[in-house]
Image: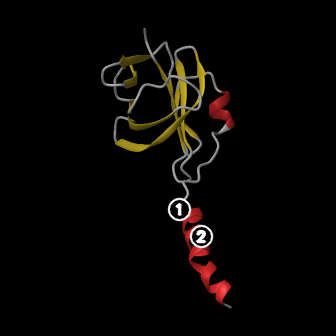
Amino acid sequence: MMKTLSLFPAILFLAVMFSSCDRTLEPDSSFIGSSDIELTIGGSVVYTYDPASWQLGYNASKKEFRVFDDSMKKYYTVTCSTLPSSTGQKLEATITWSSGSSTQTTKGKFEVAKTQGDTYWLWCGDKKTRTGVTVRILR
């Protein structure tokens, strides 16, 4: 009985530790498999960059990426805590997007899930948002 009582604080501590872990979901295979520059929220593509009617912007000093249509009504911007550089890198980012009638923002901890040249696929596997965004460093 005494041994059981002395183990109780350790068991309680471990239970609290495991319940507070940041459990994230793996990147959507469609997002990782895509070669497009896009914004994906909750597994659905919100915007896909089309070079014929969209523009890319990049500001290195602000660590900011911009993707917007020619009318500038549809867009998304990504502001990172640090510039993406390699697969597995973790960073914080704020994403703002607009459809012309409303603007939304999400913040989170992202991981660089894929790289290809100067293009980076950032993934936040938070169970509520499942956010993926592709950014390109313009040189």
- The residue carrying mark 1 is 20
| Residue 3 place in picture, x, y as percent | 67, 84
**Residue occupying the point 62% across, 86% down:** 5
Answer with the quarter of the image where residue 13 lies: bottom right
Q: Is residue 25 visible?
A: yes
> Is any part of residue 76 visible from this angle?
no
**Residue at 57% over, 14% down:** 117
* Mark 1 vs 2, N-terminal side: 2
Q: Mark 1: few, some, or many residues within 10 Å (few <14, many ≥20)?
A: few
Image-quadrant location for residue 107 = top left
Q: Nearer the viewer, residue 8 or 44?
A: 8
From what the image shows, is residue 28 above or below residue 129?
A: above
Q: Is residue 136 placed above or below 7 in the rendered structure?
A: above
In the rendered image, residue 57, in percent from the top left (x then y), is placed at 38, 18
Gap in angstroms between the C-alphas marked 1 and 2: 9 Å
Residue projecting furthest to the top: 139
Amino acid residing under circle 2:
Ala
Identify the element where label 1 is drawn. Answer: loop
**Camera-nearest residue between 35 and 50:** 35
Image quadrant where one finds the N terminus: bottom right
Q: Secondary structure beneath disc 2?
A: helix
Occupied quadrant, residue 33: top right
Q: Position of residue 109 (x, y in %)?
A: 47, 42
Q: Is residue 67 left or right of residue 121?
A: left
Disc 2: which residue = 15
The number of numbered discs placed on residues in the rendered structure image is: 2
| Image color mode | secondary structure
Q: Nearer the viewer, residue 12 or 45?
A: 12
Name the kind of residue labelled 1 in the image.
Ser
